[in-house]
Amino acid sequence: LHAAALTSLKGEIFELKNHIVRLATEQSMLDGCHTHRHISTDNKLGPADFEDRLEELTSRYEERIIELHSVIAELRKKVERHQINVIREEDEYEESDQGQSVDGESSKDENHEINQEFSRVVSEIQSTMANKPLPTGQCSDGLLGISYTAEETEDKKEDKLQLEEDGNNVDSPPKLPPRMMRPNSLTKSTSMVLDPQLKAELSVLRTDNEELRRQTCNLEIELGQMSEQMGTCMKEKENLMKKVLELQHKLQAYTTSSPSHSRVVTPTKQSCTPPPLIDRRSVEPDVYPVAKMAELKKLKTCVSDMQVLGSEVTTLGVQSTPTAEHLVQSLNDGSSVAELLKTMSRGGSTNVGEAVVKEFEVELERRQAKIDHLKAQNDVLTATLEESKSHAERLSVLIGKYESNNTALQLAAVFSDHCMEAQDVLTALLDTEMGVLLANCRAAGLGGLVETDDDQEEVTAILQRAHHARRRAEGVARHLLTRLDRNNSNHVTLAACHPWEDVSTNSRTASTSSTSSSNDADFSKADEVKLRDHIQQLKSERAAVRTTVMELQSIHVDPITSEPRKRIEAQRLDLENAVLVQELMAVKEEKAELKARSYLLEKEKKALELRLSGKETQEQAYRVQIDYLKGELSYHDPTLTCPSTTVPDHPYITELKSRNSCELLQELNLSLDRERTLKNRISELMSTLEKISRNSESRHKQSAEFVNDLKRANSALIAAFDKAKKKYQGRLKKMEVQLKSVCDKYESETSALRQRLKVEARPQPNETSL
């Protein structure tokens, strides 16, 4: 897994590197074309064109910096994901000491290789960016030179940040590179070309650049602190791993020492006669603990290989610890959540609201459903793996049978070839014998024909030809007999000469007479009988080999004559059960997802309701303010007309004494009316405040009632789910009982068919025709 992840990361890094190089070359070509086109118009640029070019260059370099930032972020995420996976795999190796040490060394080597690869890629990016050719219009335009130098400093700064962030051991926060200064000629040219407005914009850009540098410094400091924290965490993890290893060593030493002590103590309790029991006691600690440990390990592996069904759990109970832990996992999770909430409430964290707890419960339920679904999928995959494994084993057995059949058929073909050769030789002998007999009869004159000189010569020629053919046939037969005798003698002495002589059921006896002593001796009847014996022997060997040929079986269907295998049936039932559990977990996961969505929708609904209530209260306040402004307008309109006609100006207080009593009464009445209107407005404001408070209280009551309704609905849903779960479990139990009955019926039918086939297909004796 580590090697595959490392190769995938290397491939992605190589692709990103090629992409960056290609983008750099394309950008350099575009810059060259752009500067070549605008080199003639650089001297005629006005302030507006200059500003447009400056904005274009800044936007281009900002896009380039953002692209590099995205590439660096993606690489950093991949490295973090790989490190997380490595840590998880290291946690899984706590069961064995040797595997754990090897895993730690391999993970360190892989991290080192990944860091080297990242540093190499960043250095290549920096080299490509440094070797990028500058445009030709840099000397003619001073501002272009400034922008390019700023761009180079930004690229170098990004490369340095990437190198410092990819390193593992960050001891101190990195320092910023010194800012590249511009030449005096460029500053003079820019001061001569730029106007005050552009100078102000440049100063603003410089301040923004300084602010960005300050932010990057802060980020580098934070990264250094985080790296230090990661280093401390890694040290703590190594210490904990060492402690775990020590505890495992102690536990292993204790387990190895405990059986021997038990075996030493037991014989002393039964010691009655001194001499033999002392010898047995001295011998037993050397022998029995090893046997006991082997027996325990064997039993443990046998128990771990057993497949547990639902019917077995209901009838026999829980017999293994992993099964019990799997069954009480939901209760354990619920108790742990309850304990967590209780500790949070005891620890003084009273600010944890009900909404936070609800959100936590929903998220936890969703994650738990997802974990259960993944576990069910894993069970299905393991069951399918076991089934495919058994199928592969069966196919391997079938392949062996096919190979044995092929070998037997090849041997039978070889025996048939030798038998046909011997039959051909025997037929030639008989033909030549009949030819000699006919020639002798004709020479003796048995035909009653008149003999002439020509006939006499023809008869002598026929006799010569017949005797010549007879001698040739006898020579071939003698050669064949010699070869067969030699093969028989070699088979008797060495027991392995030719592949077609390996399988034989008849006992062979070496012949004592040698037929090849002289080539001139006649082929006697004994030799012919011996040749016939060899033919019969080859036929018997071919029949013996043919008896070993088995009936060809199908690849996909089990034969009827084979024994029923309960383990395969149990694996099939376990696979079906695992598929059902996987479907159930998928439904649970969908339910948890829908519950989380409903919770989010409820939160959004509550937020929208709160916003609506706020808008309503704001509308009421605006209405009250509008009424107040209307009253003020209606009150101030007559006062503006009356003083303008009656009292043109009264700057002094002494003028009040000079007024008439009717004017004073009018002003007093006006003041009383004003006071009355103000009291009415105050009463209206108080009434509106009371209405708002009542509305808020009613909303609070409605929200509380809504929460109570939701709780009641949730409890009803939980009860309905429990009922459905019980109903589904009942159906599963019924299905298991039905499957068990079907399996029993199938086994009984197969046993009956097997007995019938054994009765009908009895082995027939091998009959050979002489």
Image (spheres, rainbow, N blue to C red):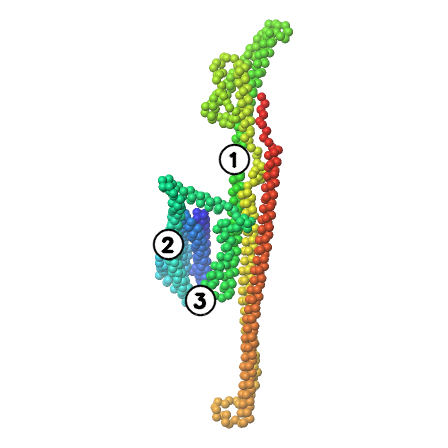
Task: Give 93 or 255, whichever is nearer the viewer.
Answer: 255
Q: Residue at x 56, y 32 (%)?
A: 550
Question: Percent position (x, y) of residue 100?
Answer: 40, 49
Of 433 and 513, nearer the camera is 513
User: What amino acid is at disc 2?
Assistant: Asn
Q: Earlier in the sequence, mark 1 or mark 2?
A: 2
What residue sits right under mark 3 in the picture?
348
Tell me what residue is drawn at x 60 percent, y 9 percent. 441
Q: Which residue is mark 1?
A: 400
Residue at image mark 2: 239
SS at mark 1 in the image: helix
Judging from the image, what secondary structure is the residue with disc 3 in? loop
Q: Residues within 10 Å of mark 3 (few under 14, many from 20)?
A: few
**Separation of disc 1 and disc 2 at Cα?**
54 Å
Spatial separation of the CA atoms under disc 1 and disc 3: 73 Å
Badge 1 local density, few (<14 within 10 Å), some, or many (20+)?
A: few
Q: Nearer the viewer, residue 47 or 125?
A: 125
Residue 658 location in percent, x, y?
51, 94
Q: Nearer the viewer, residue 313 or 11?
A: 313
User: Which residue is most to the front?
Assistant: 272
